[in-house]
Amino acid sequence: MQNRLRQLPQIQRLLESPPAVLLIHEFGHDDVTQAIRDRLQEIRTAIIAGDDAAEGLDPHSGFFHDIAVRLSGKRDITLTSVINATGILIHTNLGRARLAPEAIKAVQDVAENYSTLELDLETGHRGSRQDHVAAQICALTGAEAAMVVNNGAAAIMASLTALASGKQVVISRGELVEIGGSFRMPDIILQSGAELKEVGTTNKTHLSDYEMAITEDTGLLLKSHTSNYKIVGFTSSPGRRDLSDLSNRHRLPLVEDLGSGVLIDLASYGLPDEPVISDVLASGVDLVTFSGDKLLGGPQAGIIAGKRALIERILKHPIARAVRIDKLSLSALCATLDLYRAPNRPVERIPVLQALSETLETVKKRAGRLAAQIGALDGLDTQLVHTVARAGAGSLPQQDLPSFAVALTCSDCSAQELSRRLRAGSMPVIGRISQDRLLLDARTVADAEVSQVAQMVLSAMRA
Ligand SMILES: *Cc1c(COP(=O)(O)O)cnc(C)c1O
């Protein structure tokens, strides 16, 4: 053993060998040195353990091939596009909303060039990055003032920190939400330096519960959209107008975390009634927060809109700088918001809204095309099935969106295995498993992706 250990070459000698020189040229000195060091250590460990496999670990044969594979593997970019066939439109794990072409173009423009991010072209002086979107948001929501931050969680965090730190935040027990990714309202309130003052019960909270909780220590009243659950049955909570009257009487801000929130009434497209932001503000809520990449259909962003005096306090607070939005998201948000302005028809231009408002007939046709392109394959049963798609990411809770999927059953592999093969393809396709079948839901697949999905199913069956 000692002998074999002693025979291992020195790192320096390996680094000077011709194959190493080539690798250094491609991957850099540091990474190659580290990879060689790691590999030698593995061989050493194997020899010491008396591992038979150590026999095959000759540092001369195949050694550099192994290093090269390792280095290129390390270089693989893991954040890549996939096809969403889950039927969940706004899927946080898959990057939520796809951007409209106009938004993509805006991002590219700002990424490629210097920009007016914080420059006022007229005066030549420093401008605010907030100016690019504030007016658009105000026009679309009727708010007096608006600002944007990094994401929805940051929007509520910044609002509470600037407006209620050291004070109590009064919120109904029925609205202490937890949404994915460890966003829990009680924790956010605590982190903002405020104190949680929960009122009412899980199912019923009365105006008097809020009223009795208000003291001189109260900082604000908070409402939260119960994004991913519904309390049904024997329930009640005061309306926004009553809460607004109460908060006005006590000169306290009423803040509402809308989660998704929509800029336009989706009910007019046969879609359920999500609180429309302008209605919420008109009913007396002083400040609302919502996400840019949920039903709005833009990039990751958090929007705060409402009373000017409140927005100014948040903008002045140091937290605003810590959660500020980056230029790429900002440009995508500007372009997306622009698509909401007349004469544009956002439902036709913004991918999330397009997919949401598509008729069942259209979805069924697409599913049919997919099934036809997959065709008859040995060992694969393909069926068109009626499914239920979802908006996802805490939007339109419990709201079923009727949809169609191609259900795949593989005769000699499980649905899990088929799903794994589709994830491993050159264009990963993400479906969902139901009753031992793999469903490829057509509501979230774009027309242009249909033939690619079919191709990927064919290669998965050959695998
Ligand atoms: C989604 C959501 C958030 C968080 O928004 P992100 O953009 O994911 O940070 C906060 N509150 C509610 C009610 C939500 O639904």
Image (cartoon, helix red, strand yellow):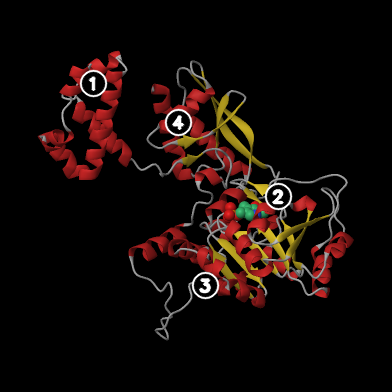
Point out the quarter of the image occupied by ligand 1: bottom right
Looking at marks 4 and 2 on the same chain, the residue that comes earlier in the sequence is marked by 2
Q: Which residue is mark 3?
A: 130
Q: Which residue is mark 1?
A: 57
Marks 4/2: CA distance?
A: 35 Å
Say which of 181 and 451 sits in front.
Answer: 181
x then y, percent, for residue 63: 20, 27
Tag 2: residue type? Val
Image quarter for residue 315? Answer: bottom right
Marks 3/1: CA distance?
A: 59 Å
Residue at 45%, 21% in the rendered image: 377
Marks 4/3: CA distance?
A: 42 Å
What is the residue that sits farthest to the top in this orientation?
52
Tag 3: residue type? Gln
Residue at 57%, 70% in the rendered image: 147
Image quarter for residue 295? Answer: bottom right
Badge 2: how crowded within 10 Å, few (<14), some, or many (20+)? some
On the rendered image, what quadrant is the C terminus found in? Answer: top left
Say which of 64 and 34 sits in front.
Answer: 34
Q: Which residue is mark 2?
A: 177
Looking at marks 3 and 2 on the same chain, the residue that comes earlier in the sequence is marked by 3
